[in-house]
Image: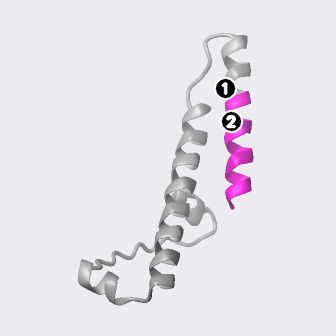
Amino acid sequence: MFNLLMMLKGKLMEIYSVQINKEGFYATPERERAFFISIAHLANEIHALLRSLLYSHNTPAQNNAEENGRVTLTLMFAKLLAGKV
């Protein structure tokens, strides 16, 4: 999804991989470690909400009640995602 969004804007996303060993992580100040963990947690929550949003309305519905349920779930996940961002 993110690659698709970036391609729509005419850009490709660059993914950087950074490996941090335990000693290097504990060598940083405590506030920076807390910030790093908070940002990682936020990224995980946004990713999970985005996947749930896409999954909730990805396949065609069998009947009207199922379609209404999927729309409701999609709107709920969209509101949660907007609140996180």
Q: In this view, does 65 lie above or below 84?
A: above
Magenta residue span: 72-85
Q: Is residue 29 above or below residue 61?
A: below
What residue is pinned by disc 2? 74
In the picture as drawn, the residue positioned furthest to the front comes out as 30
Residue 79's spot in the image, x, y percent?
74, 46
Distance CA(mark 2)–CA(mark 1): 6 Å
The residue positioned 53% from the left and 59% from the top of the image is: 2
Q: Can residue 67 be seen in this view?
A: yes
Towards the viewer: 4 or 55: 55
Q: Are marks 2 and 1 in contact (CB under 8 Å)?
A: yes
Say which of 17 and 21 sits in front.
Answer: 21
**Position of residue 22 measured from the top left corner of the image (x, y, whole percent):** 25, 78
Of the pair 61 and 11, the residue shown nearer to us: 61
- Circle 2: element type: helix
Quarter of the image that includes the C terminus: bottom right
Q: Can you tell which quarter of the image residue 78 is in? A: top right
Q: Which colour scheme is used?
A: one colour
Measured as percent of width and height from the top left, residue 7 is found at 55, 64
Q: Which mark is residue 70?
A: 1
Badge 1 local density, few (<14 within 10 Å), some, or many (20+)? many
* Residue depicted at 55% across the width and 72% down the height: 11
Q: Nearer the viewer, residue 44 or 62?
A: 44
Residue 18 belongs to magenta span: no
